[in-house]
Image (spheres, rainbow, N blue to C red):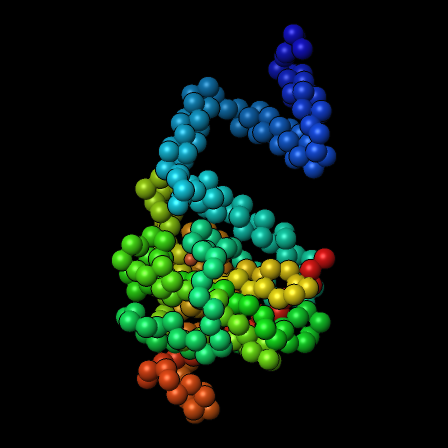
Amino acid sequence: MRNITFDNITETVTKAYAGTEDERTREIITLLIKRLHDFVREVKLTPQEWEAAMGFLLRAAQASNEQRNEFILLSDLLGVSALVDLLDGKDDAGASITTLMGPFYVPGQPDMEAGADLIKDNDGERILVQGQIRSANGGPLPGAIVEIWQNGPNGLYTVQDPNQPDDNLRCTLHADAEGRYSFSTVKPISYTVPDDGAGGELVRAAGRHCWRPAHIHLMISADGHKRHISQIFNEADPYIDEDAVFGVRSDLAVPFDREPTEAELQRFPNIKRPFNVVNMDFVLAHAE
Ligand SMILES: [Fe+2]
């Protein structure tokens, strides 16, 4: 390995990793090296550009801590997170489309039954969110677990905002015997992903923005089925067609302003009036 040249370097480096014990890790590392080397050759990367790239990655690391991972944000902003999710779900015949989990999920939120009230003393427009959880084979999934999280009226998630209770606008909802779920909440609002780190640099360099359209996050679990991660988007949001992290899917963008029917008003006597209704069913793929 003494005579490294422009022509043999890629082969030499991949061979150096050929002994990687885990087969899948070996496959990933080997192809990554080949693609990285091809990229450097194709773009004719200069030493100055390489130094700039290393500085950029260093700033991403410096922006990261226990609560914040700037590399996840970079993956989101470059569409890699969305691609990984789309790849994971593309063969799930009959299942609903999934989307990104994002960085603000916190496990272990309070257990609640269908009809739960998350509004409490949050300001904002009240909505009832409801739907049914079904299996890709068509049947409802009684007892499915729907974990919910969203931002508050100030645009912040609890993990970003010490002034909100830890469980504000979050819960672990248990679907009823017909797989139906429902909860009342306030409309989430559009917000920006953090723009004070490397992710912000990238977005500004491209003349993009950091906004995400308003959405509610859900993670749905049911025995024998794949964990289903989704978001319900307000289709009227001004950023619905330009989500900074490419998370919107057509099936997940729905009206947030439908007025309740008489039957819905009767079924939910405890939700303070007026409120609007959001409908979204989810079909889960079978676990392999
Ligand atoms: Fe979010």
Point out the residue furthest to the top here: 2
Picture layout, residue 180 above or below residue 6: below
At x 66%, y 34%, the residue is: 25
- Of 120 and 37, nearer the camera is 120
Counting every numbered tag in the picture gives 0
Residue 154 in view in this figure: yes
Q: In x, y percent, where is residue 266?
A: 43, 91
- Of 48 and 182, nearer the camera is 182
At x 39%, y 75%, the residue is: 117
At x 53%, y 62%, the residue is: 219
Q: In x, y percent, where is residue 230?
A: 52, 62
Name the quadrant of the C terminus.
bottom right
Q: Within the image, what quadrant is residue 27 found in? A: top right
Does 132 sit left or right of 150 as displayed?
Answer: right
Q: In x, y percent, where is residue 54?
A: 44, 26
- Of 160 and 252, nearer the camera is 160
Does 126 sit left or right of 46 as displayed?
Answer: left
- Of 169 and 4, nearer the camera is 169
Q: In x, y percent, where is residue 119?
A: 35, 73
Picture layout, residue 11 above or below residue 234: above
Name the quadrant of the N terminus.
top right
